[in-house]
Each structure stands twice: as structure tokens, then as C-alpha cells.
Image (cartoon, grey):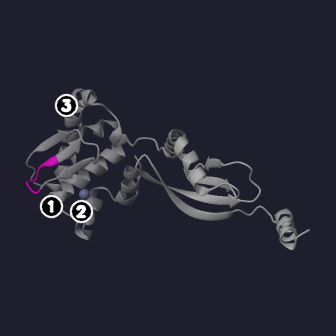
Amino acid sequence: MPLNFLLFSGQKKRRPDRPEKQKKIILIKNKKIPYTLKRSYRARHLSISINSAGKISATLPNSISLSKLEGFMQSRSNWIQRTVSRVTRTPPSLLEQGTRDQFLKSKSVARRLVLAKIRHFNKYYQFQINRVFIRDQKSRWGSCSAKKNLNFNWRVVFLGQKHLDYLIVHELCHLEQLNHSPKFWQLVAKTIPQFKQTRKEMRQL
Ligand SMILES: [Zn+2]
């Protein structure tokens, strides 16, 4: 028996299946999809797996070419995309909920709620306010403009008292400090001493 064959077969038998791992990128429908390539001596078939974090790995038997694997991944592109988006999907935030129709229906309720809270907290602060707007926006709960206008998201109707209070005070204090400086937070802390915790909670909503 030729020596090289002996070496080869011996190696094959004893070799533990510790596949060689490589980071790769494949272009699927014009999107760069990273995956881990595992070259395996033991595997008989091409396989693709997606873990609970949405990470893709592909096992490639040593006897099969990389281009075959990539062709295989392309042919399974719908399944890959569907599975990755299913496992990585996070529930939509409160800011992404509600329709335009709900906005129109809830606008006046939101306005009343906001104005009552502003009146309450501004008894203390006594800031000068120009106008208050209720808006339909998906990115923020509220804002304050240099013209001293306050804007609030209509989704304030979904908020609990604690979060609504914090939001109102936060925007009110921007009338005095149009920034997030220590001075600004000192103003907030005058009526919401636990603002740090509440602020953190608001980000999770
Ligand atoms: Zn702010």
C-alpha cells in the first residue's frame, strides 16, 4: 500500500471532527450576508444552520467545492432570509404602534392629557411656553424647539403616569436649557428626583 494512502487513511480515521471555521460573506439578493464556513472531514452533505441569534453557519464536506455551497445557499435564500428575520425579530416598540386613524381619534385626548400635566408641572417651573403640538411621529416621544414650542407624540396616551410625568418635565426643562447639560438634569431632578431610572425605562418601551 503506498505510503501517502496510509497517511491519508490513518489521518482520516483518527481525526476528530473539529471543522475548520472561517468567516465568509455571501451576496444574497444584493445583501451582504456574513456566515461561518465549517469545512468538515466527516460531513457527508452540505448543510446550513441558523442559531437563535440569527447567526448562519454552513457545513461543507471536504469533497465539495465552495462554489457548490454558495449555489446551494442562493437556492435557499428565501428560507435563510425568513429564518434570520424570524429569530432576530424584536417586538415593535410602543413608538411604532398605532395607525394614522388612531392618531386622528386620540389627538384631542392626548392634547388634554399633555396640557393638564404641563399646567401641573409649570406651576413649579413657571417657564414661558409658546405653542403645544400633538404629532404623529415614530422616532420620539417629544421635543422642544428654540421658538419655545413643545411637541408631543400622540402615543402619550399609552404611557403610565410615571413615564408621562417624566416626559412632560423633560420637555418643559428644555425651555430653559435646550441641551442635556448637568444644569438641565438639575432642573429635571427638582420635580422628578428618580429621573435616571425612569429615563432608562422609557428607552425600553
Ligand atoms: Zn431632551
Q: What range is drawn magenta here?
A: 146-150
Q: Is residue 178 above or below residue 85?
A: below
Name the residue tied to disc 3.
108
The numbered mark, 3 or 2, whose residue comes first in the sequence reads 3
Q: In the rendered structure, find residue 176 and report the number of the disc placed on it.
A: 1
Type of the residue with mark 2: Leu
Residue 114 position within the rendered picture, expressed as x and y whole percent measured from the top left: 22, 41
Name the residue tied to disc 2.
187
Horizontal side of residue 197 vs 131, given as left or right? right
Residue 180 position within the rendered picture, expressed as x and y whole percent measured from the top left: 25, 64
For the point 23% across and 38% down, the residue is: 136
Q: For mark 3, does the 10 Å Cα neighbourhood hold few (<14), some (14 to 19), or many (20 or more) residues?
A: few
Q: Residue furthest right?
A: 1
Q: Is residue 81 above or below residue 194?
A: above
Quadrant housing residue 2: bottom right
Horizontal side of residue 2 vs 141, given as left or right? right
Quadrant housing residue 110: top left
Q: For mark 2, does the 10 Å Cα neighbourhood hold few (<14), some (14 to 19), or many (20 or more) residues?
A: some
The front one of 90 and 74 is 74
Q: Quadrant of ligand 1?
A: bottom left
Residue 174 position within the rendered picture, expressed as x and y whole percent measured from the top left: 18, 58
For the point 25% across and 27% down, the residue is: 101
Nearer the observer: mark 3 or 2; the answer is 3
Under tag 2, what secondary structure?
A: helix
The numbered mark, 2 or 1, whose residue comes first in the sequence reads 1
Type of the residue with mark 1: Glu
Q: For mark 1, does the 10 Å Cα neighbourhood hold few (<14), some (14 to 19), or many (20 or more) residues?
A: some
Horizontal side of residue 164 vs 14, given as left or right? left
Magenta span: chief secondary structure: loop
Type of the residue with mark 3: Ser
Distance of mark 2 from mark 1, alpha carbons?
Answer: 9 Å
For the point 30% across and 45% down, the residue is: 164
